Image: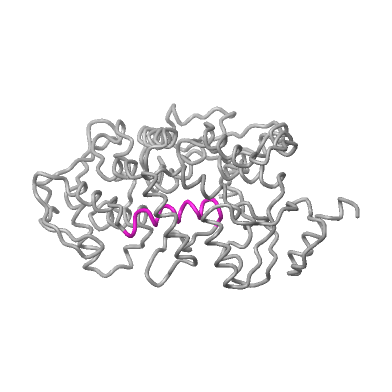
Amino acid sequence: MKASVIPALVLTAVLTGTVAARAQPGPYESPARPAPTNEIDQLVFNRLKQLDIQPANLCSDAVFVRRAYLDVIGTQPAAREASSFILNRDPNKRAKLIDQLLARDEFADYWAMKWSDLLRVKAEFPIDLWPNAAQTYYHWIRSAIAANQPYDQFVRDLLTASGSNFEVGQANFYRAMQNRDPKGIAQAVALTFMGERADKWPTNQLAGMAAFFSQVSIKTTAEWKEEIVFWNPASTNAQTTATFPDGTTVKLTSDRDPREVFAGWLMDPKNPWFARNIVNRAWFWLLGRGIIQEPDDIRPDNPPVNPELLAYLEKEFVASHYDLKHIYRLILNSQTYQLSSIPRSTKPEAAANFAFYPVRQLDAEVLSDALCEITGTTEKYSSSIPEPFTFIPEKERSIALPDGSITSSFLEMFG
């Protein structure tokens, strides 16, 4: 059979739902059959067995090297990097490549981009941070990722931040919210760090959590667009009691910032929201679908498809002292992550239970960088705010842009 015919047959199999095993794997699959290599695989494959779903074959080395580069550092491999990996006979080469990618500078660029989306790093409407603040915020985020700061400390720094939004990057967490009254802050905190849509909570539950943020004040300075975030016990909104989302009520005292009290509760290892939310989001980022789907819609009537898998990742995350790279490494080294995108089952439950790796659309920034590298061209960026430091050299990669307001016609078109 001619090699050029194989991709067409693979596509036909996917489109028609044909799942019969082939004697010879196509260019997208490895001849090796999947077998559990870690606890993630045991839990996923056990669930698939219960559902009578066959997992896909493992992906080929050519597929894996491209997938790993794009998922870990948002950058396609150079031709020499791809060929070197494919020709390498080391049986541990996939694990070694994962470690190398997690240590590269592009890792901080790519994941800072993801966190900047989540934390609303944007100088222009509707966030209106102004370039000074957006740049400071972004560089704080990127530095934390580059240093692999423990996630609990990262979140604590955001929740308890005070100071100038031009000088203290994490203080922009409060400045970047469109609704900065206590309930608006509580909703943003719940969505970002608990994966819950607090606007759907009972009124008293939201009000109880909002009380922890009733003493947050923001004042302007003589500097254009500069604002100071600070704890203000004398605020007219200040409340004397607050209620955690689990229903526990506490008395607030004038000698301790209520945000610190809330942060202490949120990061308690026994907290049912904190670790669960971020490991579910990490799984979503790497596999295109959350164990709880959507990752920002965690609620009692939206249960995980594999509760044991989610519980295992939570336990590992806490035991690692909130090391996100540890979770990424576990997922990336699993056979589950390394499955082919060609399903071997037509059952509708296959996708939700991770029986194959989903084909996904690339981020606009990643696609832009890839096309520029392939064609030897550069992208021209612009920002409607005429500040000197919103000028970005054309050779700057899109994944490293420090402000969501800096864009191009390509990025606008592809979202």
Q: Residue furthest right?
A: 1
**The quarter of the displayed image where residue 359 is located:** bottom right
Name the colour scheme.
one colour
x and y percent of residue 326 in the render?
46, 44
Q: In percent of the image, x 52 and y 33: which residue is there?
A: 103
Q: In percent of the image, x 25 and y 62: which residue is there?
A: 245
- Which range is magenta? 272-288
- Split into 4 quadrants, where in the image is the N terminus? bottom right
Relative vertical location of residue 116 with respect to residue 8 in this rendering, above or below: above
27 left or right of 332 in image: right
293 left or right of 151 in image: right
Q: In percent of the image, x 57 and y 36: which residue is there?
A: 101
| 392 vs 230, nearest the viewer | 230
| 229 vs 3, nearest the viewer | 3
158 left or right of 233 in image: right
x and y percent of residue 306 in the render?
49, 65
Main secondary structure found in the magenta portion: helix
Q: In percent of the image, x 72 and y 34: which residue is there?
A: 375
In magenta stretch: residue 202 = no
Relative vertical location of residue 202 with respect to residue 151 in this rendering, above or below: below
